[in-house]
Image: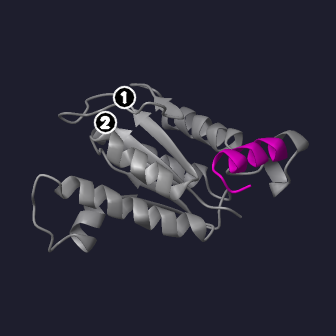
Amino acid sequence: MTGYVVWLTGDRARMDALADALRVGLAGTADSVDVLTAELVEDRLCANEPRGADFRDVVVRRLGWLGHLLARNGCALVAVSASPRRQVRDDVRAQVGNFIEVLVHGTMPDGYETPHYPEVEAAAGETPAAVVAKVRQALLDNGYVAAGGNVYSAEEEAKIKDRLEKLGYL
């Protein structure tokens, strides 16, 4: 099984409930599905870092690096981070590869830069179950997970091959 990262960004107040729903709803799509928040990374991996202007970027990059490690080892990570800078999120996207960005609409952090291309948008008032369904479809569409039974159809295999070519692997 291949791993992937589902990156929740935007309205911090709604992300925890969505992360829990995704952890449960994505079970079986990777060897394991874990949830990791930027706050946990900050507490555990950045406790001794100076709290300068770029501190939040350091936290986001470390969260992305952890996601990269988990994904390359067949696990899935639901990353919860209201990271306002689009460029830092795009850098993480490039590092991870198998990356789905979910823009959670609502009250956005100060200075928030919306993604250029979120694969999924969670509208205000949308149920967690509906968001899980959209994320599962995005994972399938991008070739990060297989359709039922972990057997790829010819169409899915073509999508995966196309994606790998675009990423420079083939």
Element under label 1? loop
* Amino acid at circle 2: Asp
Q: Who's the residue at 59% across and 67% down the image?
A: 72
140 on left or right of 35: right
| Magenta run includes residue 169 | yes
- The quarter of the image holding the C terminus is bottom right
Q: Which residue is mark 1?
A: 105
Q: Residue at x 56, y 63 (%)?
A: 71
- Mark number, residue 76: none
Residue 152 visible to an observer of this rendering: yes
Q: Which residue is mark 2?
A: 11
Inter-mark Cα distance, 2 to 1: 6 Å
Q: Position of residue 1 (x, y in %)?
A: 71, 64
What element does badge 2 sit on? loop
The earlier-in-sequence mark between 2 and 1 is 2
Q: In the shown orientation, is residue 41 left or right of residue 168?
A: left
Q: Name which quarter of the figure residue 58 lies in.
A: bottom left
Q: How many marks?
A: 2
Q: Residues within 10 Å of mark 1 (few under 14, many from 20)?
A: some
Q: In this rendered view, identify the residue nearer to me: 112 or 137.
A: 112
Q: Are marks 2 and 1 in contact (CB under 8 Å)?
A: yes
Q: Nearer the viewer, residue 57 or 105?
A: 57
Question: The disc labelled 1 sits on which kind of residue?
Answer: His
| Residue 14: quadrant of the picture | top left
**Helix, strand or loop for the magenta stretch, by majority:** helix
Whether 10 is drawn above or below 64: the answer is above
Task: Report whether residue 20 is seen.
Answer: no
Q: Position of residue 134 (x, y in %)?
A: 59, 34
Numbered range of the magenta stretch: 156-170
**Residue in front for this viewpoint, 122 or 88:** 88
